[in-house]
Image (cartoon, coloured by chain):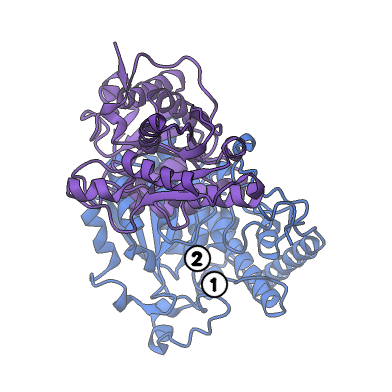
Chain colours: A blue, B purple
Amino acid sequence: MLQTVLEPGTAENAALFRETYLAAYRFMLLARLLDDKFAALWRSGRIHGGVFLGRGQEALSAATGISLQKGDVFAPLIRDAAGRLAFGETVRDAARTYLGSALGPMRGRDGNVHRGKPREGYLPMISHLGAMISVVNGILLARRFKKISGTVGAASIGDGATSTGAFHEALNQAAVEKLPLVLVVADNQYAYSTPTARQFACRDLADKAAGYGVEVDSLDGTDLDACLKTIGQAVAHARAGRGPRLVVATLLRLCGHGEHDDAGYIDPKLKASPAGRDCLKVAEEHLVRQKWADAVALSTWRSEVIHEIEEAIAQVQREPAPDPFAEEWRAISSRHLSETHAENEGDPA
Amino acid sequence: MSVTYLEAIREAQAHALRDDPRVFIYGQDVGAFGGAFKATKNLASEFPGRVLDSPISEDAIMGLAVGAAIEGMRPIVEMQFADFSTVGFNQIVNQAATLFWRTNVPCPITVRLPFGGTSGSGPFHSQCMETVYAHYPGLIVLTPATVEDAYSMLLEAVAIDDPVIFCEHKFLYYHLKAEKLPSEALPVGKARIAREGRDMTIVAYSAMVHEALEAAKELAPEGWEVEVVDLRSVKPIDTDTVMASVARTGRLLCVGEAWSWGGATAEIIARVVTEGYGLLDAPPQRLNAKDTPVPYHPNLWAAHRPTARAIAAAARKLLRL
């Protein structure tokens, strides 16, 4: 996690911004290649359940994660591999959750994108999109009770989640309580297969902000430069006590909803539009144009990242799977209040 | 000097707020107004900043409570009516109830549900939600029947490290009185023998305990000694106390104000039959509300839910089997 530099005016700030950009790019690259690896493992039958990629959303995601500091709160959405890594998740913990390692944060009890460490402000999503926003609100309100100031909560959702009641309730709640929430919407044009025209009828999702009395930013989600500046600014505003803020990024999901989905429904015109640009390529072009990196450096980084991923996956694949006979089948922490009556007790098979 | 069931709930919350700085109350109209039933009367002024009015957003109310619990607080949420908790259902059963299992992080939240029928309340202000929530792993469901239990169990609920669905019966709010608040209590998870008897066992909880006691009284002059078990908590169920009672009486009638399908009464009978079939001298019976929405008109309402008279009739039938 790095401190984002918002106004690259001075030479020093410009240098810091370059460092942030490079770091964010590395997280994007790591996320892209890690996603590719998960897809490959899924295709070869090594991953149970689904695999959900963030292809095309890495710039927005990395910018969100990198704009947060230790002590902040992050509730990612399913395409936030880059943001998770930037917020401090290790490749190993990501792999452990996908591969079901007993040593991972979810211990095989939950999988794939449903991972986090709540006590570290990194929230494990439930599948019901929109429901994480009010949980972030709760942490932020608790900090107000505890007189902890200066921390921020970020929640990521897609265009689909803006149609849920939970989104409405939670954004309104954050506004009423003036919480330091940054709500990042990745408008990736499709909620599973449903195009935005069937999702909402307002001109732009950013129009929704006025109804809640919150400030809003719109940005090109394929441009890491814009993502870093806009989200960095939104986070700084929230940190300064200016209340919640909505950020709407336009981009295109460059993959299916999950690896099971061939995304045949995506309009070719959208793919050819500016929203359809691959943010990773855009960032690489920017790096080369700015002379922050050359082709050799890009290639070296790619090799380093692949090596890092392969090493982590190899280690995690050697880790133990959860053992149903050793598992403690207890859904509450109060041992003395656990239901003792179970017809299948001691017989997990 | 006496204290009502409702006052006991208010006092327990005041006690919790006084004793534990991590406790706060969040819900609709709970602030200066003191709650739709006045269960938080004066608490906002006694504990400034810790009793917060929420928007009419049951989903966000519960989500916020989960976040606060993660951050080490002990929220008490008031759902204005248990019926309205359906709007926050997702956060209760999918967020709060799964958190510990998934992450090993406890989720100490007390969700107060003013529940159950009162005359004239109709389909959306009368529901019994206890068996719905008991169905989900990860939740504790409490159903106090007495003023003493309303107080002590609510205090214990706040201290429990898990989400507790605290079902407080609106019918008992004003009618039920005790001399004073208790200084000691049975722990959560233990049932109570509300009346001893040898001929049959009636298992009930919440308001139905009082209907069952009335029925037992009605049957006494006929020579029947009916034992009444007050379950106190629907989850966990104190199977041992129920089983021991059935071992003494050989006959079991389960009474619940909730709908019968897959409910608490069904669960108790399933346990007694699977573990204590040999204890039974007759097929176990149950009595629940009719399988329709809760009616508005007093005539219909009185016939919809089990009453002392209906329980006594069911008991007579069972005693003759």
The one nearer the camera, A299 or A126, is A126
Left or right: B32, with B74 as reference point: left
Is residue A144 placed above or below B317 in the rendered structure? above
Residue that numbered label 1 is attached to: A280
Left or right: A95, with B29 as reference point: right
Q: Position of residue A93 (x, y in %)?
A: 68, 56
> What's the mark number on residue B19?
none
- Chain label for disc 2: A
Tell me whether marks 1 and 2 sit on the same chain.
Answer: yes
Q: Position of residue A343 (x, y in %)?
A: 66, 54
**Quadrant of residue B52 within the rendered picture:** top left
Q: Secondary structure at mark 1?
A: helix
Is residue B13 placed above or below B274 in the rendered structure? above
Amino acid beneath label 2: Ala
What residue do we see at 26% from left, 57% from top? A209
What residue do we see at 53% from left, 31% from top? B188
Which residue ends up furthest to the top in the rendered image?
B1
- Chain label for disc 1: A
Q: Residues within 10 Å of mark 2 (few under 14, many from 20)?
A: many
Is residue B225 placed above or below B303 in the rendered structure? above
The one nearer the camera, A318 or B30, is B30
Q: Position of residue B60 (x, y in %)?
A: 36, 48
| Residue A180 makes an appearance in the image | no
Contact flag, marks 1 and 2 (Cβ < 8 Å) = yes
Residue that numbered label 2 is attached to: A59
What residue do we see at 73% from left, 70% from top? A303
The one nearer the camera, A319 or A232, is A319
